Image (cartoon, helix red, strand yellow):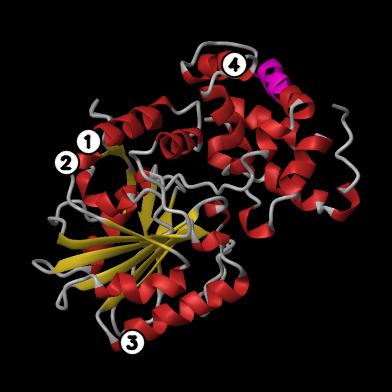
Amino acid sequence: MTDEPGPDAEALDLDDARRRYHFALAPEDLDRLPFYSALLARLEVDGVALALLASVRAEQRNPMLVLAALHRAALLGHPVLAPIYDVVRHGVATDLDVAAAAVVEVVRREPEVVRAQLWRSTQTNEPGRSAVLQAVVRDLVAPGETMAVIDVGASAGINLFFDRFPVRARDDGDPLTLVCEDEGTVDRETPLPSVGARVGIDPNPLDLGDDDDRLWLKACLWPEERRRHERFDAIVARYRSWPAATLLEGDALERLDDALALAAGDDLRVVVNTWSAFYFTEPERRAYYDALRELGASSNVAWVSIESTLVAWPGLEESTDERRRGASQVVTSSPGEAPVRWGWCHPHGRWVERLSRP
């Protein structure tokens, strides 16, 4: 395999792919993830890697898809990738730039390792975001009220069980514990509301009981974060003992009414999207927003959105807070009220800041 991207390279937006590789990690994660930082730096200047990412439709053109494809091959025992990722996963000291160069050489010589997985989407449905959801629902749901949770972009539905995870300021050794640093007036004391229906919507819902689905979810985790791998393994071991949930296959707007109908009539129905609207087209995003506004105005529906700042919801001013570059914005609405920016969080829920209200 040569370094040339291929005959169709001129038809691909390589500059867009380069930007996406360059900004794939939040600034605060660059030092924390030295292997992925070194790997992304090499991918963004490699012609084959650029062409592979640029070949993905814009809504799914996420460098994490390429990283997950490589990680999947490593988990399956690829002769070059497996030993590299095993060392990284266990935190053994090594020359990470040399390791990253070896991974990119695999991309150059065996592009099919990545290309064969580009039909997929990144479906981490990161449970760390449940730490943020717990804080938000304490604001949205009145004490003693029962809620239903509808997760748009649910993947395998892990965050439908947001209330199953202890949240602590420090690691207590339990693999299910979510470690989250709270800023502002974050409520961790009020008991979480009771949850009735738990319903997920996804174009391609995954099944934790399926070997290939479970492998892909594992591949979407970052190899340097051993804690996330331990948590995922613990979830796989325990999820069958958790309450029943329903996963609906299909488009968010097509199945939203079906999902809402599964909730008991008096329950506050809380629609959640966490890094899923990021993959909508602009018309899809506007239609989704309009649907949530209409539902919130006319029925017992609240909304929680945890998305990249690139997802610009109508009526919300664009943030100019440079401290939050790379963070996720948390937007909420209660029945009968307009959406507001509730606060900010790390994309994987490592910290959350609740903004003060006027």
Image location (x, y in percent) of residue 12? 83, 52
User: Label 1 to label 3, Cα distance in Å?
Assistant: 38 Å
Kindly identify which residue carries mark 4: 84
Kindly identify which residue carries mark 3: 297
Q: Are marks 2 and 1 in contact (CB under 8 Å)?
A: yes
User: Any magenta on residue 21?
Assistant: no
Which amino acid type is marked by label 3?
A: Ala
Which amino acid type is marked by label 4?
A: Ile
Left or right of 24 in this view: 317: left
User: Label 4 to label 3, Cα distance in Å?
Assistant: 53 Å
Q: Quarter of the image for the C terminus: give it.
A: bottom left
Which amino acid type is marked by label 1?
A: Arg
Q: Quarter of the image for the N terminus: give it.
A: top right
Q: Main secondary structure of the magenta part?
A: helix
Rendered position, 351 above or below 75: below
Disc on the earlier residue, 1 or 4: 4
Disc on the earlier residue, 2 or 4: 4
Which amino acid type is marked by label 2?
A: Ser
Left or right of 188 in this view: 320: right
